[in-house]
Image (spheres, helix red, strand yellow):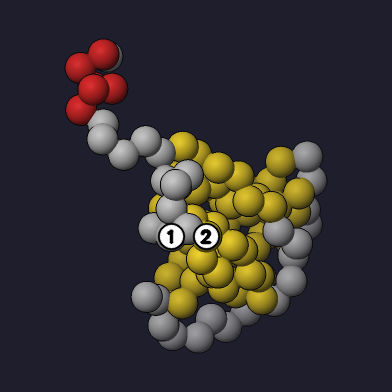
């Protein structure tokens, strides 16, 4: 395990970003953040992302769609989560 830690030059961490259920969601997160999970914690929708804490924050815009709703092209699915009785699907514009 020590050899693995030594090989890591950039130190990253998983951070949680909360949001509200709305059509358009704007989250400021570190540049290059990689979304690893979308879910709900204590009834609050969240995105967990692998970030470089030293990177500058950038604004990312997401769109939220319910199951069965039309989704326009040019969007990338980032994850889905449930707030019973609904299932939501989080998308981001392709970069």
CB-based contact (under 8 Å), mark 1 and mark 2: yes
In this picture, residue 45 sits left or right of residue 12: right
From the viewer's perspective, is residue 3 above or below residue 12?
above
Quadrant where the C terminus lies? bottom left
In the image, what residue occupies the spot 37% across and 36% down? 11
Q: Secondary structure at mark 2?
A: strand
Between 54 and 95, the residue placed more toward the observer is 54
From the viewer's perspective, is residue 87 above or below residue 62?
above
Between 91 and 4, the residue placed more toward the observer is 4
Q: Secondary structure at mark 1?
A: loop
Q: Residues within 10 Å of mark 2 (few under 14, many from 20)?
A: some
How many numbered callouts? Answer: 2
Name the residue beneath numbered marker 2: 57
Residue 79 x, y percent position in the rendering: 52, 57
Name the residue beneath numbered marker 1: 31
> Does label 1 or label 2 sit earlier along the sequence?
1
């Amino acid at each position: 395990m020590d050899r693995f830690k030594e090989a890591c030059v950039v130190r990253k961490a998983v951070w949680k970003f909360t949001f509200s259920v709305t059509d358009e969601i704007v989250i400021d997160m570190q540049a290059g953040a990689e979304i690893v999970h979308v879910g709900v914690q204590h009834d609050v929708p969240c995105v967990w992302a692998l970030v470089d804490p030293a990177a500058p924050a950038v604004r990312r815009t997401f769109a939220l769609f319910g199951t069965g709703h039309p989704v326009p092209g040019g969007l990338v699915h980032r994850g889905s989560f449930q707030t019973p009785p609904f299932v939501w699907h989080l998308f981001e514009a392709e970069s």
